[in-house]
Image (cartoon, helix red, strand yellow):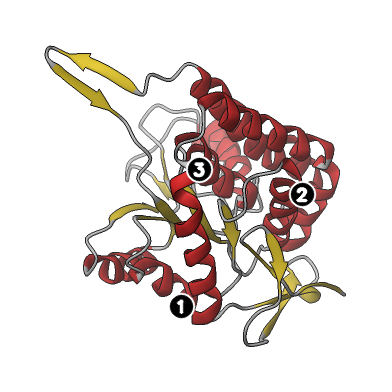
Amino acid sequence: MKEYLQFYINGEWVDPVTPRTLDVENPATEEPFARISLGSEADVDKAVAAAKAAFPAFSQTSVEYRADLLDKITAGIAARTGEIAEAISSEMGAPMWLANAAQVPAGMGHMATMSQILRNYEFEEQRGTTLLRKEPIGVCGFITPWNWPLNQITCKVAPAIAAGCTMVLKPSEFAPLSAQILAEIIDEAGLPAGVFNMVHGDGAQVGPLLSSDPRIDVVSLTGSTRAGESVSREAAATIKRVSLELGGKSANILLPGCDLQKAVTHGVRAMMNNTSQSCHAPSRRLVPAGPLAGAQAIA
């Protein structure tokens, strides 16, 4: 069994303050295949402190410097595509072809695209006699889900690096291995210590710690409505910015006159593409009460 028992804090791999582990199961076999540590309040405190200390210097770095960092991370992901794809398939069940063709490229694409945008982004705009300047908000707390793990992490981490923010990431405890590899890639890319920090943990314990910490300026969650409610409550006391993407399965709406054979076939394929673990997977089908064209074809 693979063991990943350290957190990435302040540019170093460190042991948890209080040892506590969790076995990670392969959903295809329902057998544990890896083990991680779960963070505590002390671990989160260390990570947030590191991010807070790193912000003043990193926020003043040049656009070119940050874009080069994003390019290095992109190259690192590309070099380890097969390893990351295998990790994603093992931790959340995506078919290997999909992990290679979509899961990893999606995450890599966020980094590459953000680098391109950053190099041409206007941080200052003159409006009449007023100069508007966009500045990094500060320390970011990121809480990400299991279904598209690398994609959901990089779509938060990439713009934070581009803007000059520092961050603490809590990836899903059910799909932590791709995050572990990404942290290794980020370390090798040479981000200054404290810019990126990662603490594994369960959402019920570590999530509220990130949301409520007054040193964190913005918290971003992709997850359930219940988790979103918790983040909103915990963040309210410090009036921090909150970004919520509360996913849910989409409806597959069949209209009168549709080709039923084609619609049902497409719906099933779209539902099962990522082992049904996509927020837009059409797991509900809404059908008119009257007859539909093509009904005889699949009756």
The CA distance from mark 1 to mark 3 is 31 Å
SS at mark 3 in the image: helix
Task: Give the residue displayed 42% in from the left and 63% down from the top.
Answer: 224
Q: Position of residue 11 (x, y in %)?
A: 66, 57
Q: Position of residue 90 (x, y in %)?
A: 78, 60
Answer whether labels 1 and 3 touch (C-beta < 8 Å): no
What residue type is disc 1 on? Answer: Ala
Task: Give the residue displayed 41% in from the left and 35% down from the top.
Answer: 292
What residue type is disc 3 on? Answer: Phe
Quadrant of residue 33 within the rendered picture: bottom right
Quadrant of residue 269 within the rendered picture: top right
Tell me, for residue 93, which label it has, or none: none
Tell me, for residue 95, which label it has, or none: 2
Neighbours of disc 2 within 10 Å: few (<14), some (14-19), many (20+):
some
Q: Mark 1 or mark 3: name the one nearer the start of the chain.
A: 3
204 in relation to 125, above or below: below
279 or 22: nearer the viewer: 22
In the picture of the structure, the residue carrying the numbered disc 1 is 204
250 or 62: nearer the viewer: 62
In the picture of the structure, the residue carrying the numbered disc 3 is 58
